[in-house]
Image (cartoon, grey):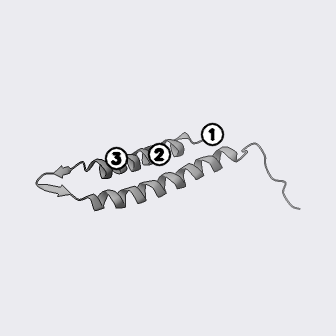
Amino acid sequence: MGNRPFTLIAAILFGLAALLHLYRLFTHFQVILGSHTISQTVSIVAIVVAAILSWGLFRESRRLIDLKPDVVPARRA
């Protein structure tokens, strides 16, 4: 998993959040907070934001895995 597994864990969590909002869109599941009903538009925005964050964090976690921390570049004189 590399040196920082939390980046990959965060990417997975944001991906799950995007999938849950996608599920809400297809099943027309209602979310009610107090006396307010949250519209489906909120889920559309949440899908886009969570998917972008998940994709970016996954790319970052892959970059951290591909880096070789033991290799130190030579200094120029």
Of callouts 1 and 2, the N-terminal one: 1
Q: As shown in the figure, which amino acid type bears the numbered disc 2? A: Ala
Crowding around mark 1 (Cα neighbors within 10 Å: few <14, some 14 to 19, many 20+) is some
**Image quadrant containing the N terminus:** top right
At numbered mark 2, what does the secondary structure look like: helix, strand or loop? helix
Q: Secondary structure at mark 3?
A: helix
Query: As shown in the figure, which amino acid type bears the numbered disc 3?
Result: Tyr
The residue under label 2 is 10
On screen, 71 above or below 74?
A: above
| Front of the two marks 1 and 3 | 3
Q: Earlier in the sequence, mark 1 or mark 3?
A: 1
Residue behind mark 1? 2
How many other residues sit within 10 Å of disc 2, few (<14), some (14-19) or many (≥20)? some
Q: Disc 3 and disc 2: Cα gap in Å?
A: 20 Å
Q: Residue 2, located in which quarter of the rendered image?
A: top right
| In-image side of 2 versus 11 (left or right) | right
